[in-house]
Amino acid sequence: MADANLLELDHVETCYGLSQVLFGVSLSIGPGEVVTLMGRNGMGKTTTVRSVLGLTRTRAGSIRFEGREIRALPTYRVAKLGIGLVPEGRQIFPNLTVRENLVATAANRAGAGNPWTLDRVFRLFPRLAERGESKGTQLSGGEQQMLAVGRALMTNPKLLILDEATEGLAPLMRAEIWRCLAGLKAAGLSILLIDKNVDALTRIADRHYIIEKGQVVWTGTSPQLAAASDIQQRYLSI
Amino acid sequence: MKAALDARTLFVVIVVAGLVLMPVYTGVRGDVFVLTLFTRIVILAIAATSLNLILGYGGMVSFGHAAYLGIGAYAVGILAEEGIGSGFVQWPFALLVSALFALLVGALSLRTRGVYFIMITLAFAQMIYYVAAGLDRYGGDDGLTIYARSRFAGLISLSDPTQFYYLCLALLLASIAFTWRLINSRFGMVICGSRSNDRRMRAIGFPTFRYRLAAFVIAGVWCGLAGALLANHTDFVSPAMMYWTRSGDLIVMVVFGGMGSLFGPLFGAISLLVLEEGLSRVTEYWQIILGPLLLLIVLFARGGIDGLIGRIRRG
Amino acid sequence: MLLLLEQCLNGLQFGLLLFLLAAGLTLVFGIMDLVNLAHGSLYMMGAYFAATFVAWTGNFFAGALLALAATLLLGIVLEMIALRPLYGRDHLDHVLGTFGLILFFNELVRLVWGPAGLSLPLPVALNTAVDIFGIYYPAYRLLIILVALLVALFLYVVVMKTRLGMLIRAGASNREMVGALGVDIKLLFTLVFGLGAALAGLAGLMHAPILTVQIGMGENILILAFVVIVIGGIGSIRGAFVAAIFVGVADTLGRVLLPDLLRLVLSSTAASTLARALSSMLIYLLMAIVLALRPQGLFPVAGR
């Protein structure tokens, strides 16, 4: 039953140098699910993402993608297996144009039927089509976020991970991102979301994990989260 | 902790005692070669100690430090050639020119950091090399012979190998003592602090540029002194003294011995020169061994000799 | 006037060779953050390989191609064995490690080819002069200019128009992210280093017939390559191009014109001594001026 999951973390421990940050994180994402990882700053959300991708070395535990152990794999291999990252801070390539940002790392490794192409991404984000030849540095925050999402989509991932994708964006922009994610979910993409906006998250996501001090302290469905205002208060400072 | 200190202190005492007693040994054995070798080691140790101030403690990777060896040497050589043989004139002149060059190079290079700094100091040193090579009047590429060592009005005779050796040794110990005083003062704190976190130092209110420039000049001047000694030692000056690979040798000595440790440069100088001597007896092509050895040390024994000794008690 | 034109061409030729060397250096530094002092050794190996292979095959072009291939191979092997462990480390570690490699290569060359230099004679076909605007200019030097310009164009196309180029530029600003998007960074590094090595080798083999092929030839020109990339902006190939031409022409013209200029105001002997000193210093003075005005170089790379 566990192997039906797309991504499964089992008691993952991660250290930065000598200080331990993750003390046994366990979570799972099923195919087609949208799952969130919430918690205050510094609790280990980004570290969890980095651990999955092998960007930060893990010390113990197990990370399985489509049933296959990936904990010790180099980052590019993990990405190639079908994980697309939209990182914290967007991290688009500043010296490349919008087109180049999208095309440089594009791939269709799983041979998907209706793959993400440049055209399809431009249809999803018309603003990017207009700014096609602009350099990364010339984009606004919202445009950079769209670009980061588009760039990850161009790798045709099975699982999309978005780390603080609405941070620092104007409300209109945020709404557009949520709309986009809802559309992606409808298209069947599995998504792991790290964000702080509980209301929006409960609307779009199926299940939630709350992480505090490097451990998962609560997990449940959206209705359960909406009802548990004490949990929200305690761990999310709403 | 105290035990580790003892191992290191013991090692230092042994080495220094050995250096002090060296002329006795060579006098008994009549071995001039070893005394000459160790004079050279001591002189280069002074140069390495000066580099350690800015590189080991200050984190400024100056790849042009041999320039000051050359400047100090040429100051002595040129004055000697022009008939001025008094050390009282030559040596201060050597220090002055070194200071001016260091001030110039430092003012321009210290605005940059990292790779830029390395390449710029390298370039300026190479510039001086080419200038020296172009000085036809003073031997150009072939170099200039010095027919009489610096005279000090009878106070000391540099032509006497033993007296000369002890002068160099005294100056070396003085350099190390001076470094110790400097590092343990507020000046030293700023230098070490701005190595790891320049912004914080400036936020506290220290004009770090000025401090680092001062350290750079001090290091240059001190190395110029070593240059003056070197000219007397070899009775010869040539542009090759400041070819950039010599700067590399100095860096190797500092890193070999252990960066940011007081006696590290001395250990480094001894090791490198003894290693060169030893290896060259094994094979004419000793640098084939030294080169990769250097790479291996960089990869696996970064703390240098000082680091290794420090580990004796702990491990 | 004609002499001036000839010297300008010489300066252009020298500058373009410097560009080949500097481009490789800046490429490697830009994307891999590696300070490689042994880059000059690759230039030297290109020259030595060329002298040897041309002698073996009796054909200049065959020998040159073999030398290029050999240097490329050497570069790749060097990267995989000696340089990979250095990635991510302090620049000081790079400097020391690659300095050790210089010692190694110089001694290796001495062991294999002996301490005396080699010469690489030009084939008869290239050893002629061509009439350009009234001057007779060596055909070989024109060939160097042509080849180097073609290579520069090739580099431009690769870096600006191909996916590999996009990855190189992306990697120069954010290596980690490129890996996170599924690109094998290690392989990319090896490719880039190989490219840099080939460029250095090409510069070496092309320069060989003009100079003596000797131990340590790499170090002299390496410093100039450093000056070029400092002036041009570390990590910028465009900057390297502009700066290299500038440095090449300035250096060549400086050496030629300074003695005459100084002779206008000083006595002959004083003029030639001063001219010698100044023309050696000229490039470094230019570097100092550029640094004083724009410490990041003429075309600094964004995102560093």
Image (tube, rainbow, N blue to C red):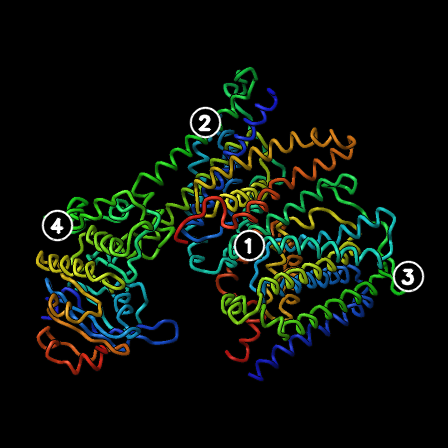
Residue denoted by label 1: B117
Residue denoted by label 2: C146
**Pointer 2 chain:** C
Q: Amino acid at mark 3?
A: Ala
Q: Is residue B46 above or below residue C222?
A: below
Instruction: Identify the residue shown where x is 54% and y is 58%.
Output: B294
Disc 3 to disc 4, C-alpha distance: 91 Å
Disc 1 to disc 3, C-alpha distance: 42 Å
Evaluate if marks 3 and 2 touch, with contact meaning CB atoms under 8 Å apart: no
Q: Nearer the viewer, mark 4 or mark 1?
A: 1
Q: Secondary structure at mark 1?
A: helix
Q: Is residue B269 visible?
A: no
* Mark 1 nearby-residue class (10 Å; few <14, some 14–19, many ≥20): many
Query: Is label 2 on the same chain as label 1?
Result: no
Q: Position of residue C98 (x, y in %)?
A: 52, 52
Instruction: Identify the residue shown where x is 28% and y is 53%.
Output: A140
Evaluate if marks 3 and 4 touch, with contact meaning CB atoms under 8 Å apart: no
Disc 4 to disc 2, C-alpha distance: 47 Å
* Mark 4 nearby-residue class (10 Å; few <14, some 14–19, many ≥20): few
Q: Amino acid at mark 4?
A: Ala
Q: Position of residue A82 (x, y in %)?
A: 19, 57
Evaluate if marks 4 and 1 touch, with contact meaning CB atoms under 8 Å apart: no
B77 vs C50, left or right, is: right
The C terminus of chain C sits in image quarter: bottom left
Q: Is residue C220 visible?
A: yes
Q: Position of residue A89 (x, y in %)?
A: 30, 61
